[in-house]
Image: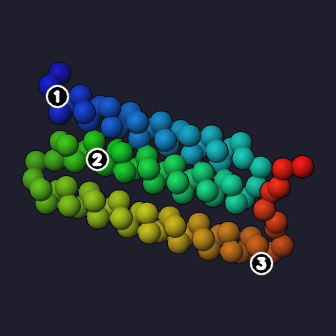
Amino acid sequence: MNVPDLITAVLITAGLFFFLAGTAGLLRFPDVFTRLHALTKADNLGLGLVLAGLAVQAPHPAAVVKLFLVWLLVMTGSATAGYLMARRALRNGLQPWRKP
């Protein structure tokens, strides 16, 4: 296994770990706000690591730019969707969880 393949494997594995952590947060956290936080943060970082691993294997710089643009679009969409869902939850009367 050569060095770029090893870097790709490490980055993709780390990205998958963050996807798993976001999913665990979705299932384990107590309210919609903490769940949204887990998903938006962990999934954006996981996607960034996976795309960085793919960028190492990209044949042309244009492919790396496209991967980066995909990541930017997903981060923008994720942040916007998370904000809108949290705002709707607050307007519907849901209160953020507080430690008893």
Q: Which residue is mark 3?
A: 91
Residue at 41%, 41% (x, y): give it. Answer: 15
Which residue occupies the extreme right position in the image? Answer: 100
Secondary structure type for disc 1: helix
Q: Which residue is mark 2?
A: 52
Which residue occupies the extreme left position in the image? Answer: 60
Estimate the spatial distance between the alpha carbons at disc 1 and disc 3, rounded to whole Å. 51 Å
Q: Nearer the viewer, residue 99 or 57?
A: 99
Residue at 84%, 73% (x, y): give it. Answer: 93
Question: How many residues crowd around disc 2 within 10 Å: few (fewer than 14), some, or many (20 or more)?
Answer: many
Question: How many residues crowd around disc 3 within 10 Å: few (fewer than 14), some, or many (20 or more)?
Answer: few
Which residue occupies the extreme front position in the image? Answer: 99
* Dot label at residue 59: none
Q: What's under tag 2, amino acid-wise?
A: Ala
In this rendering, position of residue 21 left or right of residue 29: left
Q: What's under tag 3, amino acid-wise?
A: Arg
Vertical arrangement, residue 63 with respect to residue 1, above or below: below
Vertical arrangement, residue 44 with respect to residue 50, above or below: below
* Dot label at residue 3: 1
Secondary structure type for disc 3: helix
Estimate the spatial distance between the alpha carbons at disc 1 and disc 2, rounded to whole Å. 15 Å
Residue at 71%, 42% (x, y): give it. Answer: 28
